[in-house]
Amino acid sequence: MNGPAPMEVLRQHLIDPEICIRCNTCEETCPVDAITHDSNNYVVKAEVCNGCMACISPCPTGSIDNWRTVLKSRAYSVEEQFTWDELPAQNTTASAALDYPAQAGADTNATDATDATDNPDENPEGIDVDTVRGSTLPPWSAVKPYVNLYTHKQPLAATVVGNYRLTGESTASDIHHVMLDFGTTPFPVVEGQSIGILPPGTSKDGKTHHARQYSIASPRDGEREGYNNLSLTVKRVTQDHRGNVADGVCSNYLCDLKKGDKVNVIGPFGSTFLMPNHPNSHLLMICTGTGSAPMRAMTEYRRRRRLKGATGKLMLFFGARTKEELPYFGPLVNLPKDFIDTTLAFSRTAGQPKRYVQDAMRERATDVGQMLRDDNTFIYVCGLKGMEDGVLQALRDIAVQNGIEWDPLWRALKREGRLHLETY
Ligand code: A2P
């Protein structure tokens, strides 16, 4: 007589819906397209995920790093995961089969699943840099950030201390500078990090709204230096990706806030898109629209630090439809030329040809090439999804034009935490 069929066990990769801020980073990072989403949750396809771990460190919240030991035949389907409001507890049968601890909700350490290989291009986390487009590690000198101090279950109420429009009144782009103050409650942040905002109310199905993620636009020591506050750059969303009328729940909420209003904040998030902390490092920053928020934070930190001897070069390429639609246009053009080398690219100026950031970079190929040649240069790209390909292509062409081999440079940039991409 045959014995019972062997139970095949799978260490299933799952995303915690209670912590996830639906920022799409994991879906973009996954080299095998194992991650997908619906309007409720981001989920992992068990049959596609190969446990490569490329998504783990870019996730700003850590919600991606969840694992359950399951019988392979009973792996959670994506349909099932779409309905979850919280992760299931560890199933005892499957964990017993692998002799894993079976406490409710017990997570296993994600890094255990990584097989070390002898690929020289792997970074210390075992990620093959050829499978990712940008760095999954911070710069070596970045300060260690705090993350997830405040959660959906325990948000922090911040007070609105300012809210004003940054873009010309006559333009369609309604972009606001929103300042939030935390009073005497600690909310430590560093440049490049983001926070989550919990808009009040519920969606059509009666569920509370998910948090929306916004990059912090101010430096670590406050929007107002020495204060426990920060700022956000928020564009009022009035249409969806297809151009249909659709009011963004959170952006409209934020843009309409008045001084003194209270806002529920979670986070901070992000541990890779961070600036180097050594004062002679160079920053090459490329952004469009509200993607300027982290660039403003880094630039302002350097401006304050310059007075204390920071000597690294700053080069900025900034794209917008017109000068009236470029957030922070006034303060930006007033920064001293010997502090930051700024090139603006406008795509919809009447009577002028369309110009994107990548066109502007090509025009400055010699200077960009000089920065690429310097292994003290850290590159940041933030803004529209569509710009990512164009900017990477421009970097490649500029490298080649300057006699630098792109592929080894690209790998080095990724491995050394020197190429940070955040597009949406
Ligand atoms: P466009 O005039 O073609 O929309 P937005 O105002 O929508 O946030 O966009 C900011 C800027 O980014 C605009 O100038 C926009 O130009 C530009 N842009 C749009 N697509 C790309 C792309 N693929 N690469 C670079 N810039 C882009």
Image: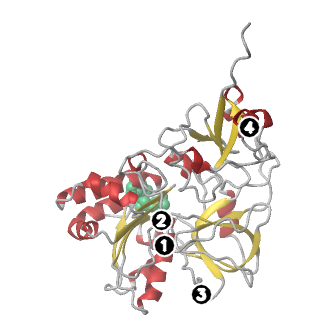
Mark yes or no: residue 76 visible: no
**Mark 1 — residue?**
142
Q: Nearer the viewer, residue 310 or 126?
A: 126
Residue 221, quarter of picture: bottom right
Which of labels 1 and 4 is toward the front? 4
Where is residue 43 drawn, in percent x and y? 64, 41
Residue at (46, 53) in percent of width and height: 385
Q: Which amino acid type is marked by label 1?
A: Ala
Quadrant for ligand 1? bottom left
- The amino acid type found where label 4 is placed reads Ser
Inter-mark Cα distance, 1 to 4: 38 Å
Whichever of labels 2 and 4 marks the residue nearer the N terminus, that label is 4
Residue drawn at 60 percent across, 89 percent down: 226
Query: Mark 2: which amino acid?
Result: Pro
Which mark is drawn over residue 138? 2
Q: Could you give the CA–CA distance between mark 2 and mark 4, rounded to whole angstroms? A: 34 Å
Q: Which quadrant is the N terminus positioned in? A: top right
Residue 156 vertical position relative to residue 7 in the rendered view, above or below: below
> Spatial distance from mark 2 to mark 3, Cα to Cα?
26 Å
- In terms of image quadrants, where is residue 271? bottom right
